[in-house]
Amino acid sequence: MAATALLVATLVMAAVEFRPCWSQNITRASFPKGFVFGTASSAFQYEGAVKADGRGPSIWDTYSHTFGKIIDFSNADVAVDQYHRFNEDIQLMKGMGVDAYRFSISWTRIFPNGTGQINEAGVEHYNKVIDALLGNGIQPYVTLYHWDLPQALHDKYTGWLDRQIIQDFTAYAETCFQKFGDRVKHWITFNEPHTFAVQGYDAGLQAPGREGNSATEPYIVAHNTILAHASAASVYRRKYKPAQKGVIGLSFDVIWYEPVSSSASDVEAAQRAQDFQLGWFLDPLVLGDYPSSMRIRVGNRLQKFSGSEVAVVKGSLDFVGINHYTTYYASNTSSGIVDFLLNDTLADSDTVAFRKWFVD
């Protein structure tokens, strides 16, 4: 069926000698009142129909057609064709009894070139999706950016490396608030910004596969992303939230780090790893600045927030989304192995994460 992947839930059990108690009868009543059960997707991975109804190309279209030919010839031109088959998918979700569906809006379906004239066909598509979800008792949780930057903005000014992106993202976000905010009550500005900052602009393993200065560019991308979130959240809170009664937040990919020993140096190393992974983005939004461990080690390569920017950035979250995949052991080290196990961006933390496939 079109959305088989949509319905697959994977449970990874990494604990040693994990003994599940299958005899326990777990039901919805086992969870706290108000607990929301849902499923999720991203536009580029699910929609397909990349040239339908005026959609413009994104950096992931370009990347998949460039590097997909080298690796496995894959791209997302069709994917699971959710663009055309969303009604089937929603019926599958309803049959599962989910409460919510988190999906992302493709920026280039709303603005094919990133800015300019609105593509009404794209707006109409998401109106249909939202209405169909609500009609089946499923709440829409909307992600505004799940890595698919309009290719036109990357070509025009290198996208997230230029502060112009803050203005353009805010304009796109506000358009979504205007068009869908009467029904959408949960907004996620960005999904996993750490991933696209590092993998896209340091390691080059994801779009746009940037081969620039990996010692500086991920920090610039991250800084502009934080400012773009804060700008969009400010607009939502001032102009739309009072009437629409929604909330706005951000989702992080969170790896947890445990010290490999109880020594003070390893405990501090685990904290540094956490700072460079989660604190990098969360600390400014909660405390108004980057972690001190980053400031010390990254130095002038790490941007600074002005006083006016701090006022907008700090406290710009109504909620925090956590995507947790795994936990690593961390150990303090000054050896060159850091550069092998961690990319250039994180090497300055003097922290090594012992991934299980490495130690095995």
Image (cartoon, grey):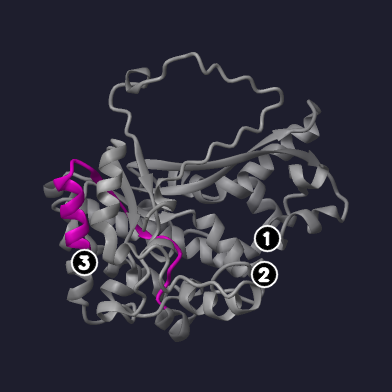
Identified at 78% across, 34% down, the residue is 266
Judge depth for marks 1 and 3 and give the one in front.
3
Q: Quadrant of residue 21?
A: top right
Q: Position of residue 324 (x, y in %)?
A: 53, 41
Pick whichever, 70 or 155, lies toward us: 70
Residue 331 lies in the magenta stretch: no
SS under mark 1: helix
Residue 146 lies in the magenta stretch: yes
Identified at 18% across, 41% down, the residue is 137
Image quarter of the C terminus: top right
Q: Position of residue 23 (x, y in %)?
A: 50, 14
Identified at 50% across, 62% down, the residue is 223
Image quarter of the N terminus: bottom left
Q: Tell me if residue 303 can be seen.
A: no
Q: Which residue is mark 1?
A: 345
Q: Disc 2 marks which amino acid? A: Ser
Pick whichever, 171 or 127, lies toward us: 127
Residue at the right extreme of this rendering: 335
Question: For the residues marked 1 and 3, what is the alpha-carbon distance in whole angstroms?
Answer: 39 Å
Q: Disc 1 marks which amino acid? A: Thr
Q: Disc 3 marks which amino acid? A: His
Q: Which residue is mark 3?
A: 125
Question: For the residues marked 3 and 2, what is the alpha-carbon distance in whole angstroms?
Answer: 38 Å
Q: Which residues are magenta?
A: 126-150
Q: Which residue is mark 2?
A: 214
